[in-house]
Amino acid sequence: MRLFYAIFPPREVQVALGEAQEKLRSYKGWKPSPPHQFHITLLFLGEQPPERLPEFRRIGHEVASRVKAFEVTLGGTGYFPPTGGPRVWFVKASGEGLEALAQGLQQALPDIEAASFKPHLTLARKKGPAPRIGPLVMNIRFQAKAVCLVESKLARSGSQYQVLEQFPLK
């Protein structure tokens, strides 16, 4: 099972970000992320045996129960990598609880090798040669109320996400 912990924005935010993706229409080479799959990854777990699901559920609940619900701000857009040919177009995310959640999950799962935490929401991925899109400032806010444990199934059409469980924030 390919798993990760994430925060999903509410439907109205998905719609607003989907409208921002319209900037891509005149640029070849970008594959927009489906709006219903927009999320902020807190910790990517990678391939895991199903036997670990009870542990991941317990840890998700424990970590989420220690962090109060908080406001997330989606600010300006950026790229990974930041220089050279871009592969990912994203919007930066900030919020008081993001770091606490990411660190709490990482500390509870020291065997999971994690990349440095850069809170963001992926708007599009590069499919081929693609130009940089001019910067946008979103200034969209939403209330983070839960952390989700998500399974990612790889398919020809792209990743398909299924929320396995939601863990409410305090």
Image (spheres, helix red, strand yellow):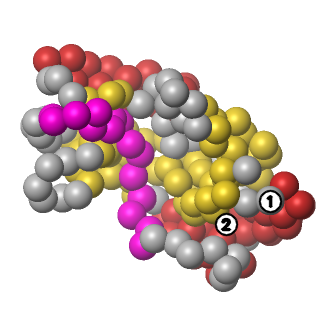
Query: Does the rendering let one see residue 97?
Result: no
Reply above or below: 94 against 99: above
Image spot of residue 24 (x, y percent): 21, 24
Residues marked 2 and 1 touching at CB (< 8 Å): no
Count up the numbered dots: 2
Name the foreground residue: 48 vs 23.
48
Gap between marks 2 and 1 measured at Cα: 28 Å
Q: Which mark is residue 49?
A: 1
Q: Amino acid at mark 2?
A: Val
Image spot of residue 166 (x, y percent): 76, 46
Q: Amino acid at mark 1?
A: Pro
62 on left or right of 75: right
Neighbours of disc 2 within 10 Å: few (<14), some (14-19), many (20+):
some
Neighbours of disc 1 within 10 Å: few (<14), some (14-19), many (20+):
few
Name the foreground residue: 61 vs 141.
61
Q: Nearer the viewer, mark 2 or mark 1?
A: 1
Range covered by the magenta-colored residues: 116-130
Q: Secondary structure at mark 1?
A: loop
User: For the point 80% across and 59% down, which residue is it?
Assistant: 49
Quadrant into which the C terminus falls:
bottom right
Image spot of residue 93 (x, y percent): 39, 53
Q: Which mark is residue 67?
A: 2
Q: Is residue 118 magenta?
A: yes
Q: Earlier in the sequence, mark 2 or mark 1?
A: 1
